Amino acid sequence: MTTSCKITVVGSINMDLVTRSSRFPTVGETLLGEGFNQFMGGKGANQAVAAARLGAQVDLIGAVGDDSFGQELLANLRKEGVNTEGVKTVTGQSSGLANITVAENDNHIIVISGANFCLTPADIEANEHRIAAADVVMSQLEIPADCVLATAKLAAKHGKPFILNPAPAQKLPQELLQLVTALTPNAYELAISLGLPENTAAETLISQTPCPVIMTRGSEGAMYVDENREIRSQATYCVTPVDTTGAGDTFNGALAVFWQHDLAKAVKYACAAAALSVTKAGAQSGMPTAVELNDFLAKQSQ
Ligand code: RIB
């Protein structure tokens, strides 16, 4: 597999404050936890790192605060080879934070947006050249909605594929959906994106979406519509999960990297990358390099 492509990510950058416990507490309960770690995160930053690890040339457009977390987050992105010239530092604002509990092979996340919500459509427009230069443009919903729309419009203006990961879930305007090349929700996020009941069948949701959908299904892999409008499934890979935080972001980063391959292959590689990502603690620690992904896929086919 070759991975030389240019990706521009417009999205959030967070410091993840992660508590591990044997189970989730019930409402009103105080629980003694098992450990605490601070990890680099944020859906935009995670997707950027996932793509960079796989060999893509990545530009990130976003915002951090002028606090110590902001400096650490920027240093980490640079260490990972992500170009941060499109990331602004907001004076007097704290960086985005995520309060994460990991338990029962899953997680609960509360995000405090901080500087992420200081990003404006004018910032996106000031970075138009990064969108114009990309092979693939991607975003998520941890930044203001008008920034996501501005990104989608610029991607369309320059004829670039626009992958939107609609997380955290919110109802999406038709104007935005019409500009999306691939929407990558889980079933819950797709129902909320369309304003439909949460228990609507996956096939119904996919058939009612005005843009192509690649639905992530956790331990069941992914579901997508192929070039002939047929619904296809990609099984996931069997791994022992340590921390599922960032699995969706890894899926998206890998999908963007392999977007120029055929869709079935891109989804397969994205599922494999996501499976590897859950084998280590923290959103970014388990994201594979291209060599690690190749080795993993080669072992699966033996
Ligand atoms: O998708 C995982 C990410 O969601 C975490 O890194 C956290 O920062 C939140 O944005």
Image (cartoon, rainbow, N blue to C red):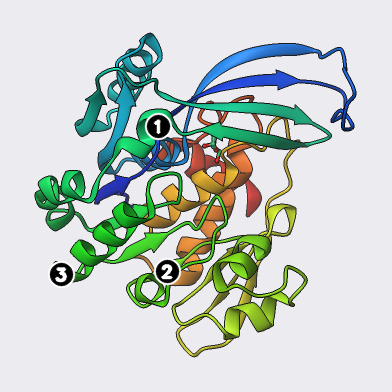
Up/down of 76 relative to 200, above or below: above
Mark 3 residue's CB less than 8 Å from ligand 1: no
Q: Residue 182: x and y, percent?
A: 42, 69
Q: Amino acid at mark 1?
A: Ile
Q: Disc 3 on helix, strand or loop?
A: helix
Q: Is residue 230 left or right of residue 82?
A: right
The label nearer to you, 1 versus 2, is 1
Q: Residue at x 55, y 67 (%)?
A: 193
Q: Which mark is residue 61?
A: none
Q: CA distance from mark 2 to mark 3?
A: 16 Å
Q: Is residue 284 left or right of residue 90?
A: right
Judging by the rendered image, the residue that carries numbered circle 1 is 13
Q: Is residue 50 left or right of residue 229?
A: left
Q: Amino acid at mark 3?
A: Lys
Question: Quadrant for ligand 1?
Answer: top right
Q: Residue 248: x and y, percent?
A: 56, 48
Judging by the rendered image, the residue that carries numbered circle 2 is 182
Q: CA distance from mark 1 to mark 2?
A: 22 Å
Judging by the rendered image, the residue that carries numbered circle 3 is 157
Q: Amino acid at mark 2?
A: Ala
Up/down of 197 relative to 57, above or below: below
Q: Residue at x 68, y 60 (%)?
A: 217
